[in-house]
Amino acid sequence: MLEINGLHVRIGNKEILKGIDLSVRAGEVHAVMGPNGSGKTTLAQVLAGRVSYEVTAGQALFGGKDLLAMKPEDRAREGVFMAFQYPVEIPGVSNAYFLKAALNAIRKYRGEDEIDAMDFVSLVQERMKLLGLDESFMKRGLNEGFSGGEKKKNEVFQMAVLEPKFCILDETDSGLDIDALRLVADAINVMRSPKRSMLVVTHYQRLLDYVTPDVVHVLVDGKIVKSGDADLARNLEKHGYGWILEEAPGPAP
Amino acid sequence: MVSKTAIQEQMAKQEYKWGFVSDLEEETAPKGLNEGTVRLISAKKDEPAWLLEWRLRAYRHWLTMKEPTWANVTYGPIDYQAIHYYAAPKKQPTSLNEVDPEILSLYDKLGIPLLERERLAGVAVDAVLDSVSVATTFKKRLEELGILFSSFSEAVREHPDLVRKWLGSVVPFNDNFFAGLNSAVFSDGSFAYVPPGVRCPMELSTYFRINAANTGQFERTLIIADKGAYVSYLEGCTAPMRDENQLHAAVVELIALDDAEIRYSTIQNWYPGDKQGKGGIYNFVTKRGKCLGQNSKISWTQVETGSAITWKYPSCILQGDNSVGEFYSVAVTNNRQQADTGTKMIHQGKNSRSTIISKGISAGRGRNTYRGQVRIFKGASSARNYSQCDSLLIGSDCAAFTFPDIQVQEPTAQMEHEASTSKIGEEQLFYCQTRGLTPEDATNMIVNGFCKQVFNKLPMEFAVEASKLLQVSLNLEGTVG
């Protein structure tokens, strides 16, 4: 589903990603872990289409299409979704209005009709249950005055409504208490399907206790230095990143 | 990939869709202003002697006044002798059927409901083209309720006592330079009187349009809500595209007696000039309401998207005890537009309350100034004011200013003032894009969210129009490549 080859990215004069190779097949959940400043968020944002990041080399193919050549909105319409680490607030625009506009933009791109108002309501209500959100939530301004946890839940809720093919979750677990973490993880698990892939960017093992990844990658200084199965994440939690750095080939940071 | 500058460029481009000129035969006074002009206008309208006298006093006083320079706007000198002070269609209609088809089709283009279909919409329109009121609909139905709604000239003929009693009682002719000019040369406008205890069953509406070249439009509106009456009034404005600037100096006076309520909504879309700032309307308007009676209420709602320069402060004098004044405003400046707008809330009555919600949006090289005064006089015990002024910036060449003036002489008064400035940021746009929305859709959505508090105060059909107008003013249509 997603093929990244030799991806180099910089911001200004600083090179952040120094040659990423990553292959995610349909139905797989990949976790990307790594210490602060290793380039995890950059990877997520570049895939979603942030302009301030400059791709200097490499490519990313999504379903065979050149992802990096697409505008961010077209990536979304093709089925790429990113749950933000820090979602923005848009005062005065209700969650319901925003989500409906987003859903219809995606449907229009696929040549489908706008969603019927009643169908939208039932879809939303069903997905709200997944995350334990109440009715008033849809009427509130988008992330306006939301707590950190509510914002994160809203990201996963949007994902559940928009039903993307490829989900990027950028530190969705940070700022969540245990109960909220479990709700969010359950929602993510419900969404796992043979047709949908996920890239879970995280610092910690705790989300991965609930959402078991198929592959775990360790990103250090802009490169993937180790990949493995779910056990790799557990080892990292126990021993930190130090042992990997010693094992890793090439110059240490 | 979309760059931010591309979006800004796109938004800086502007299309004015109402820029057609109607080919009507008009009767125009020669350019220039002197006592003769004032007498000519008065004579054309068969006015009584007292009104001519009032105009002449206004004119003589105006000669002693200086054009104000304190506003945060810049423009070249206005040559008051180069303006036609009177223009009227030659054929004078006596009923709707006799209205010049050109005029009707003009209103059609403007989307003003004039004929049968408006009755369905429940709108009574007093359409003012240049200086003469063209047609008044629904008069009969309103008359049955004792509501008077007509052109100003007609009110002078039919109800001189009412006009004489209230004219200039809220905005006297010596109030300010532009009000003085208007008092001398006003050519027509709208008049409404709602008798005691009557709730006006429909929105009263006037559409103003400046058609003739080199014409100043000086309309005068007077609305009186007698004890316990209620009226909601809508006003919309457009003007053709012309290279030269045109002056619009209107005066609106509202009077609310005991327990009366007046809602006054404006959508102002005068021609704003082109991208380089050539042409456009100078909109120098004095609007003021007096809450004369106890428990009276006056509410101003305005959406200002047009005009090269806007100088406008719809205000409330809260004289009656427990009276309420409200001001809800959205002002947009794009390209080279400049707006200096806001309100005054003058508290004199006990327990009087006022609310100010001002939303300024600047794009292109627009300059947007909020100027507001809240005065609470001694004796206005327990008076309260809440003010909120928010500015939204789009792009980096525009500017927003805020000049609040708060004077409180009453120790029991309560004041709240909140202000914010925000910018539509890359973060917000990117977030919306990752959900499948284009930057234009996203900007439109953010702007509408920003204005929601004000749009909610507009009558429903106006709110839809306001939202569309905003989109056109910021030119968020089309695609960015």
Image (cartoon, coloured by chain):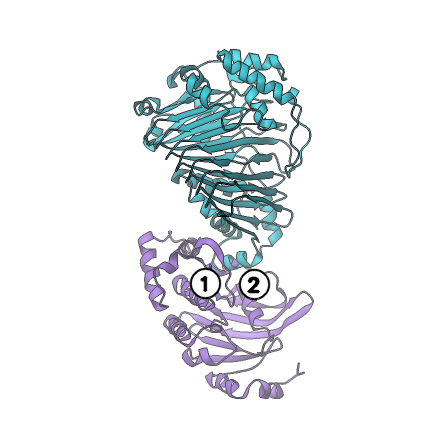
Chain colours: A purple, B cyan
Name the amino acid type tagged 1: Phe
Compare residues B155 and B103 and report the one nearer the observer: B155
Residue B437, how many percent across, how many down?
48, 54
Residue holding disc 2: A68
Quadrant in the picture for residue A185:
bottom left
* Number of numbered tags placed on the structure image: 2
Quadrant in the picture for residue B84:
top right
Mark identifier at residue B451: none
Tag 2: Cα neighbours inside 10 Å, few (<14), some, or many (≥20)? many
Going by the image, does A167 lie left or right of B181?
left
Residue B114 visible in the picture = no
Going by the image, does B32 lie left or right of A99?
right
Quadrant in the picture for residue B119:
top left
Q: Nearer the viewer, mark 1 or mark 2?
A: 1
Query: What residue is drawn where x is 42% and y is 45%?
Result: B456
Q: Are marks 1 and 2 in contact (CB under 8 Å)?
A: no
Residue holding disc 1: A146
Does label 1 or label 2 sit earlier along the sequence?
2
Residue A82, how many percent across, how many down?
49, 65
Mark 2 element type: helix
Question: Disc 2 sits on a residue from what chain?
Answer: A
Compare residues B251 and B481 and report the one nearer the observer: B251
Location of residue A110 with respect to B317 vertically, above or below: below
- In which quadrant is the N terminus of chain B drawn? bottom right
Location of residue B54 with respect to B222 vertically, above or below: above
Residue B339, how many percent across, how many down?
59, 39
Q: Is the same chain shared between marks 1 and 2?
A: yes
Tag 1: Cα neighbours inside 10 Å, few (<14), some, or many (≥20)? some
Mark 1 element type: loop
Residue B191, how many percent across, how many down?
43, 24
Name the amino acid type tagged 2: Leu
| Mark 1 to mark 2 CA distance (whole Å) | 32 Å
